[in-house]
Amino acid sequence: MTTSGRRRAEADDEYTEYVRSRMVQWRRTAYLMCGDWDRGDDILQRVLTELYRSWARARQADHLDALVRTMLVRRLIDERRLRWARVRLGTALPDVSRAFADPTDRITLVGALRQVPPRQRAVLVLRYFQDLSVEETARAMGCSTGTVKSQTAKGLATLRTLLTPTLTANREE
């Protein structure tokens, strides 16, 4: 094997290891933002392809996780705007996230999250599911910290409005 071939193989191994170590987190983020495992997987695949193509440059980034998170968030928001055609193949159901102890709560929250506007949803997922700070969320979304704060407040208000009837009904049972 030539020196350049060996370097390429090492870079491929580094890329593969990096992606494997973060795949579950990225996949959950994509699902929470778009509310559909299949669409989330499609979007994540496009991000990973883009990352692979630019791996030589990307791996030198000071904050590689932040770079990839930004790529994912932007792709998810753009996908929502484009409304591309969706094709479903296969009959197997995707695995279910274990983010919530009670499956009913998970279904209720994810259903409500789907109704939140895309930018507000992205902020909520990054802040509360990815546990990012306001500043990290702003960098990932390419906006100001003030925008993150206002989108968070609006998103939480929307969720409260959507979830209040469900919470009230559950308490009465």
Image: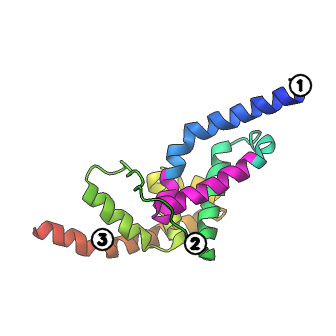
- Residue designated by label 3: 163
As helix, strand or loop, the secondary structure at mark 2 comes to: helix
> Please, what is the dominant secondary structure of the magenta stretch?
helix
Q: Is residue 58 visible?
A: yes
Determine which of the numbered discs, if any, sits on residue 171 in the image. Answer: none
Placement of the C terminus among the 4 image quadrants: bottom left
Determine which of the numbered discs, if any, sits on residue 3 in the image. Answer: 1
Q: Position of residue 159 (x, y in %)?
A: 37, 70
Q: CA distance from mark 1 to mark 3?
A: 59 Å
| Residue at the limit of the structure toward the front, as seen here | 90
- Residue designated by label 2: 80
Given the image, on which type of amino acid does mark 1 rest? Thr
- Local packing at callout 3 (Cα closer than 10 Å; few below 14, some 14-19, many 20+) is some
- Local packing at callout 1 (Cα closer than 10 Å; few below 14, some 14-19, many 20+) is few
User: Residue at left 25%, top 60%?
Assistant: 104
As helix, strand or loop, the secondary structure at mark 1 comes to: helix
Residue 108 quadrant: bottom left
Residue 161 quadrant: bottom left
Mark 1 vs mark 3: give the one in front: 1
